[in-house]
Amino acid sequence: MTGKAKPKKHTAKELAAKVDAATTNRGGGKAGLADRSGFEKGGHAKYECPHCKTTAPDVKSMQIHHDAKHPKIPFEESKIINRHAVHVAEPSKPRPGVRGSLRK
């Protein structure tokens, strides 16, 4: 007997959640720093604010950042720096992934 409705083994949902948590890049740590900076491996931080050098993955996120941090300066999409166009990543280095890992 196991007790009051306590499962004896781990459920498939719980095991899948553990695998997902272990193999998904959440953006933290050294790997996340390289991913956010975008210089090392050509990460997801594509655009850079011309005023404070903060990075963002898309124009909409950059506009939200600009409205929050630089409200007195008018937003001009043409002044945003595209870091992927400026810096070409080395093909020998693996690009950072949002999901997945070599560990399974």
Image (cartoon, grey):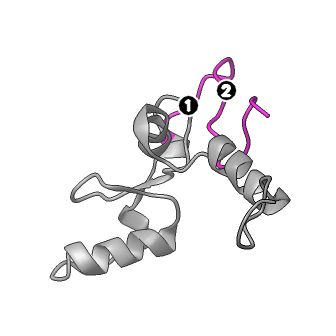
Asked if the residue under mark 2 is in contact with the one under mark 1, i.e. CB atoms within 8 Å, the reply is yes
In the rendered structure, which segment of residues is drawn in magenta? 86-104
60, 34: nearer the viewer: 34
- Amino acid at pointer 2: Pro
User: Could you tell me which residue is drawn at 20 percent across and 74 percent down?
Assistant: 70
User: Could you tell me which residue is drawn at 55 percent across and 42 percent down?
Assistant: 43
Task: Give the x, y percent position of residue 81.
Answer: 41, 54
Q: Quadrant of residue 62?
A: bottom left
**View extreme (left): residue:** 72
Q: Is residue 102 magenta?
A: yes
Residue designated by label 1: 41
Quadrant including the C terminus = top right
Would you place residue 92 above or below residue 77 in this image?
above
Quadrant including the N terminus = bottom right
User: Could you tell me which residue is drawn at 79 percent across and 56 percent down?
Assistant: 8
- Amino acid at pointer 1: Lys
Q: Is residue 34 magenta?
A: no
40, 14: nearer the viewer: 14
Secondary structure under the numbered disc 2 in the rendered image: loop
Q: Looking at the image, is mark 1 or mark 2 earlier in the sequence?
A: 1
What secondary structure characterizes most of the magenta part? loop
Q: Dot 1, crowdedness within 10 Å: few (<14), some or many (≥20)?
A: many
Mark pair 1, 2: CA separation: 7 Å
Task: Give the x, y percent position of residue 29.
Answer: 42, 38
Whether residue 103 sits left or right of residue 50 in the image: it is right
Q: Is residue 104 visible?
A: yes
Task: Give the x, y percent position of residue 33.
Answer: 41, 39
Residue designated by label 2: 94
Q: Dot 2, crowdedness within 10 Å: few (<14), some or many (≥20)?
A: few
Secondary structure under the numbered disc 1 in the rendered image: loop
